[in-house]
Image: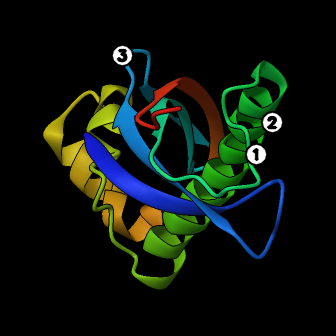
Amino acid sequence: MEECIISIPSPFDQDQVIDLYVTLGEKTKNDVKIINGAPFISSKVNLDVKILSSNKNSNYFEEDNLRLIEEYANSYIKAELEKYLYKTSKNFESDIDLFGRYATKYFSTWDKWLEYNWLDNYKNAFFNVETEVNVLSSYLIS
């Protein structure tokens, strides 16, 4: 993903949503370790966010409100990424994000890689997701 628009529940009013324009930041990093035969996948995801929506009772220009949106978006996106990753590994048994390319360094030959059978072991993967959401600004006009 390079960019997308998502809607998250508003931290100010759970009956409202805030639309965010999200782009992938430069510091995003993935790593894979093999622990007791199972993949342990770490993802550090850095996202830049711009607020696209507003309601008449919210002041998104105040620093405290922006910080609250940033913290809420961070925890929301982290939880959604974890659900997504576990769903691809446990339910779909499919490495659609190509984490296997980070695991090849543990296998000295192609035959050892094939013997390990990445796709069969991917369904046993564990994930550690860290997110950093940075609210850069807003498209909103005051």
Q: Are marks 3 and 1 in contact (CB under 8 Å)?
A: no
Q: Are marks 2 and 1 in contact (CB under 8 Å)?
A: yes
Q: Position of residue 26 (x, y in %)?
A: 36, 16
Which residue is under mark 3? 26
Label 2: few (<14), some or many (≥20) within 10 Å? some
Upstream in sequence: badge 3 or badge 1: 3
The amino acid type of the residue labelled 2 equals: Leu
Q: Position of residue 110 (x, y in %)?
A: 15, 40
Point 60% across, 51% down: residue: 77
**Left of 51 or right of it: where is 71?**
right
Which image quadrant is residue 71 in?
top right
Which residue is under mark 1? 72
**Left of 10 or right of it: where is 93?**
left
Which image quadrant is residue 68 in?
top right
Which residue is under mark 2? 68
Q: CA distance from mark 3 to mark 2?
A: 23 Å
